[in-house]
Image (spheres, rainbow, N blue to C red):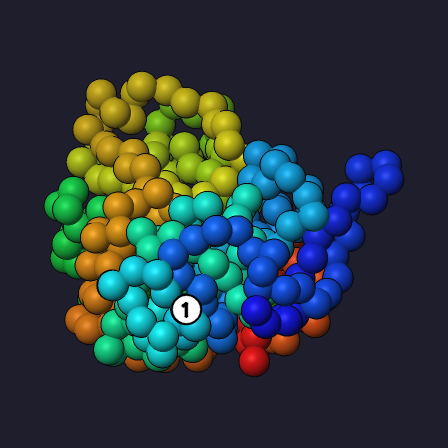
Amino acid sequence: MAVFKALWVTEAPHGVYETQVVERNTGDLPAGDVLIRVQYSSLNYKDALSASGNRGVTRKYPHTPGIDAAGVVAESSVAEFAAGDEVIVTGYDLGMNTAGGFGQYIRVPAAWVIKRPQGLSLREAMILGTAGLTAALCVEKLERSGLRPDHGSVLVTGASGGVGSIAVELLAKLGYTVAAATGKLEQAEFLNRLGAKQILDRATVADGVDKPLLKEQWAGAVDTVGGDILFNVVKSLQYGGSVACCGLTAGAGFKASVLPFILRGVNLLGVDSVELPLVVKASMWDKLSLQWKLDNLEEVAREIALEELPGAINQILAGKLVGRVLVNLG
């Protein structure tokens, strides 16, 4: 058994949740096939929800969040993995009700674990993390629906966030003309560096909620925010266009109409990266390490230590974070 550091979320009186870095013992981790020494994690919106007591994400406290982890196998009870293997874990129950990547060790089922693709370092894998995996799944789903670079501009909402920034960079790499919608217009230069050709104020995308249809503008879209902005995107797709939906920071509900679907033949595509079959996840990680490998991942990343996580969690809940936050667990 080993002693390690972990972010620990506890429930205090009056519905308040407190975070601190504590020492834990690997003997206290849940049962599982593989014990992993975590080197890097990353901060996602779901982690912040878990850390702030959202019972839809985490049912029992105290708890260690962190839906992403990359590190080295310390112990394994299965033949597929051996001590010293470099591995990635994202999604499933990690960081939700199973102690997550904001601890220096995790113990998980082998069915959650992927060997690190040769084309990515552990650091690069966690700059991507769930956000990068989700962005790539969105782009893949759009292309499967028929989207091609010569069809017209592709909109990304929440473009300065984790999923959005990687979606902008990936779409630009693949030759698409990208329009980036953001509530942080001061980040226009950042988005231009990622490859966005047009920067839109989020407020302009939010206009027209009460209209059944909007002007046809976008060949496709990646929506990371949800709410009425999502359906405004649906209403402004070109004929036959598609939007891949993967987030809810603007809300889980929206005012909808069948008109865009029956008059323009548009498609609303749901994207999940949490419960995706492991073989599909592994295939996408391979793609992100090879033909879809981003040339400038560091552009979207800011590295912090475990002790800096509480402040970063407050920032993401307040909508103040840009790009990806990489957590170095040493």
How packed mark 1 is, by other alpha carbons closer than 10 Å (few <14, some 14-19, many 20 or more), is some
Question: 31 or 123: which is nearer to us?
Answer: 31
- Could you tell me which residue is drawn at 20 percent across and 59 percent down? 283
Whether residue 39 appears in this view of the structure is: yes
Residue 3 appears left or right of 94: right
Say which quadrant the C terminus sits in: bottom right
- Could you tell me which residue is drawn at 64 percent across and 71 percent down? 3
Q: Quadrant of residue 89?
A: bottom left
Q: What residue is pinned by disc 1?
A: 75
- Could you tell me which residue is drawn at 31 percent across and 51 percent down? 111
- Could you tell me which residue is drawn at 41 percent across and 32 percent down? 231
Secondary structure state at the residue bearing disc 1 = strand
What's the amino acid at mark 1?
Answer: Glu
Residue 262 appears left or right of 23: left
Query: Would you place residue 101 above or below residue 156 in this image?
Result: below
Whether residue 293 appears in this view of the structure is: no
Residue 324 appears left or right of 9: left
Residue 6's x, y, as percent?
64, 65
Q: Quadrant of residue 7?
A: bottom right
Tally of numbered tags: 1
Say which quadrant the N terminus sits in: bottom right
